Image (tube, rainbow, N blue to C red):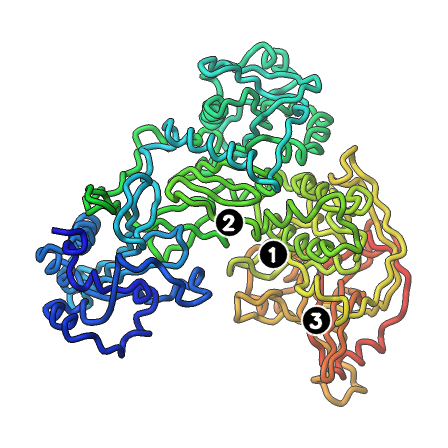
Amino acid sequence: MSQMEAFCPSCLDLEYARLRDPAKYMNLDLPESTAAASEPMSHLTKPPRLGQIPPQPVYPFASWNHSYRGHKTSASDIEQTAVGGCKACSVLSKAIRHHVPNFSPGDKVIIKADDDQRTPLILEVWPDYRLNSLEHRRSEVELELFSVEGSPSPWPTVRVARDLPPSTSSSTSLNLAKSWIHECVSNHADCSFSKTALPTRVIDIGSKGNMDPRLLVSNGEFAEYAALSYCWGGSSVLTTTRATFTDRLAGINFGHLPKTIQDAVVITQNLGIRYLWVDSLCIVQDDADDWAEEAAKMKSVYANSLVTICAERADDNEGGCFLPQGVLREPALKIECPGTAASQSYVYSRLKRYRDEWAGEVGHSTRASNTKYVPSRLQTRGWTFQERLLAPRIIHFAGTEMAWECTIEYRCECQASPTPNSQGYKSKFLRNYSPATTYDSVEYRSFKFNWSQIVTDFTHRNLTVGTDRLPAIGGISELMKPDSANDYAAGLWKKDFALHLLWYVPGFSSFNATTSRRHKEYIAPSWSWASVTGPIRYFAPLIHTESKYKIEVEILDIDLVLSGPNPFGSLKDGHIIVRGLLAPTHLSLLQVQLDPGHPFGIRISVGQFDPNEPDPRHTPKGDLCFDVKGNGETNYDAINKQPGGTEKHNFEIKMWEDLYCLMVMYRSEEYYDEVHIIVLRESSREHGAYERVGYLGGPQQMQSWEIWARKATLKTIKII
C-alpha cells in the first residue's frame, strides 16, 4: 500500500484552506467521483487535501484571528473511516479516545490549522448537545497534534514541537536553557552582552559539585553572573546582616538556604556561571545606608547580568524554581503514523496549551479555553516589575514549563520555534531609551506613552513596604532618557511636567472599589502619584496633546530635597511653584455610580447654586477622582446623609470643605469644553501653601464652564 493509499478520500481531498475557513467553499460542486467515494462519511462531502498541499495564507490577518471555524466533522465519522484504514483518521481517533475517554459518537469535532508555522494542529471535541444534560455535563476539550524533530509527519499542518521532559530540573530542560543563552548572546544584536564589573557583592557558587556557596565582596572583577528574581513571602528569609556578614564571607551551608535559592544555585551551576546575585544575601538588610546605596544600583545589577532566573512558580522563598519533587509532567501521547518516506513516524497529542502574551504570560499552560490567565504572585509584586523590564535575558521557571524572554523573542519548552518579541512592550522600552534619546528625537513621543503605561502597570502591583514606591521603580527611571537624574521629579518628569500632573486614582480597579491612602511616612509631595498607595492611571491623551490641547498652567519652580544619595528614591521634602487659573469650590454631593467600570467612580457638583443663574442645569459638574479614598464602600448616598460621612469612610476631604480647582489643560470644542484640573486644599502643614487632593476632568457644557471660569483668578501658588 502506498503512502497516499493509506488515507481515505476525505483526507486526500481535504484542502488546507478549508481548515482555515470552510465557509468559503460551502457551495463548491465536487466531482462525482469524490462525492461517491465519500458518501458514507459526512465529513468528506466538502473539499480537498490535508497532506498534499502545503499551507497557503488565506487571509492576511489569520495569524491573530482566533475565530476561524475549521473543518467540521463528528467522532463517529472519524471512527468509521479509521476502521476503514485511513491513517490520518486513525491518528485523530486515537487522540480522541485517549484524551476524551467518555466521548460519544455524536460529538462534534473541529480540525483547525493556522498560517503561523509555530502553532500545532488543533482538534476541538464538542460534546453532543443531545446527550449533554445537566447531570452529565461535559465541556469541550481542545487537543493539539504535533511532530518532533527527526520524526516528521506526512501532513504539513502537523508542525514540529517538543514533548516535555518530566521536570524542569531535568538535564534536558537545563541544557535547553543553556542553548537559549548562547543563541541570544551570539546572534541578537539588540541583546548584546559583554562582561562588566560584578555587583558590590555576589554569591560565589564555585564549580559544579561544590554545593556550599559563600558571599564574595567584589573588587572590580569583570565576570558573568546570574541574578535571581523571586518572592520573599511570609516565611523566614535567610539574610545578610551586620551580625552575620563575616560568617557569610566564610561560607553558607547549602542546606540552610531557602529552597528557591537552592534551586537558583543548581541552575546557575548547570548553566556554567560561577556567580549569583540574590538581594537578601548581597545587601546588608539591617543597614539603611547600604540598602539605599545598593537599591540605587538595581538598574545595573539586572541590566548587566548574563541571565536573570525568574522563580515564577514560587509564592515565597521556600517554593523553589523547579516543580515539586514527585510532581511530574505527563508526556504527550505518541501515535504511530506513516512517515514522509517508507519509514514509520509518530504524531504526538496532548491537551492544548495556552499563552496570553497580552497579559504578560511567557510560558504555556494547560487550562480550559475560557479560563483567564492568573498572574503568578511574583508578577503581582512591585519590585519584580523593574527586574523583569530591565533584565535583557530571563529564564522563567513557571508552574508548567520553563520559558525564555529576551529583547528579540520568547521561547519555551513546548514549542520548537521562537515567538518574535521585537514589537513588545519590553523590547521597545530597552531599545528606545538609549543615551542618544533627546526631547527632540522621535523616541520621546514613545517615552511619554511608555512612562504612563509603566506607572500604571507598576502601581497596580503590591509592595510589602509601601514607602518603597519610588525606589522600586528607580532602576527604570534611571534608564529613561534624556539626563534622567536631572529631569526626574518624584515620579514625574520636568519636561511636559504639567501633563504628568494629570494622574488619577481610579474609582475602581478590576471591578473592585479602590482603596488609596497617604503614606504614614513622608516620601513624596502631594502632587506626586508616589504620595499615595492606590493604583494610578494617566489622562489618556498624554501623547496626543501637541495640537488638540492647550496647557493653562505655568511651572515656575520645582524644588526637591532627597532623603538619600539616590536621585530616584524617596524625598524628605518638595514643592512646586505654579501660576494658573484658580477657582474656589467644594464637595457638595456624592452620587452612586451604577457602572463599576467607570474610570473615576465619583460624581460631584462644584459651586453652590447661584440664584442669579436661571437654569440650574448650568451648575458645573465633573468627574472627581479622590487621591485618597475609602474602604471598598460604594454607597455614596449613605455617605451624603451621614454627618462626617466622608471621614468615616476614609476619604481625605470632608463634605462642604473649601477646595480649589487649578486648571492644567483644556480643549475647546463647538458644544463643550474638555477640562483637566487638579483639585487642591489649603495645607495644614505650611501656611499659604496648597496640597493636592484629587483630579477633576471631563467634558463640560459651554455655559457651565463659563460660570466656573468667572470665579477663577490668575494666581501664583505653592503646592507641597
Of badges 1 and 2, the one in the foreground is: 2
In front: 201, or 133?
201
Q: Which mark is residue 588?
A: 3
Q: CA distance from mark 3 to mark 1?
A: 18 Å
Residue at the spot x=21%, y=61% of the render?
12
The residue beneath circle 1 is 630
Q: Are marks 3 and 1 in contact (CB under 8 Å)?
A: no
Which one is earlier in the sequence, the residue at label 2 or at label 3?
2
Question: Is residue 286 in view from this perspective?
Answer: no
Q: Tally the numbered discs.
A: 3
- Badge 1 marks a residue whose secondary structure is loop
Q: Badge 1 local density, few (<14 within 10 Å), some, or many (20+)?
A: many
The residue beneath circle 2 is 420
Q: Specify the quadrant of the image occupied by residue 580.
A: bottom right
Q: Amino acid at mark 3?
A: Ser
In front: 663, or 226?
226
Residue at the spot x=57%, y=20% of the render?
203
Q: Specify the quadrant of the image occupied by residue 398.
A: top left
In front: 319, or 149?
149
In front: 506, or 377?
377
Image coordinates for residue 25, horizontal then vertical, percent: 29, 74
Using residue 285 as the reference point, say whether residue 499 is left or right of it.
right
Q: Which mark is residue 685?
A: none
Q: Are marks 1 and 2 in contact (CB under 8 Å)?
A: no
Question: Is residue 441 in view from this perspective?
Answer: yes
Q: CA distance from mark 1 to mark 2?
A: 43 Å
Using residue 236 as the reference point, say whether residue 194 is left or right of it.
right
Q: Amino acid at mark 1?
A: Gly
Residue at the spot x=49%, y=42% of the render?
377
Which one is earlier in the sequence, the residue at label 3 or at label 1?
3
Q: Badge 2 local density, few (<14 within 10 Å), some, or many (20+)?
A: some
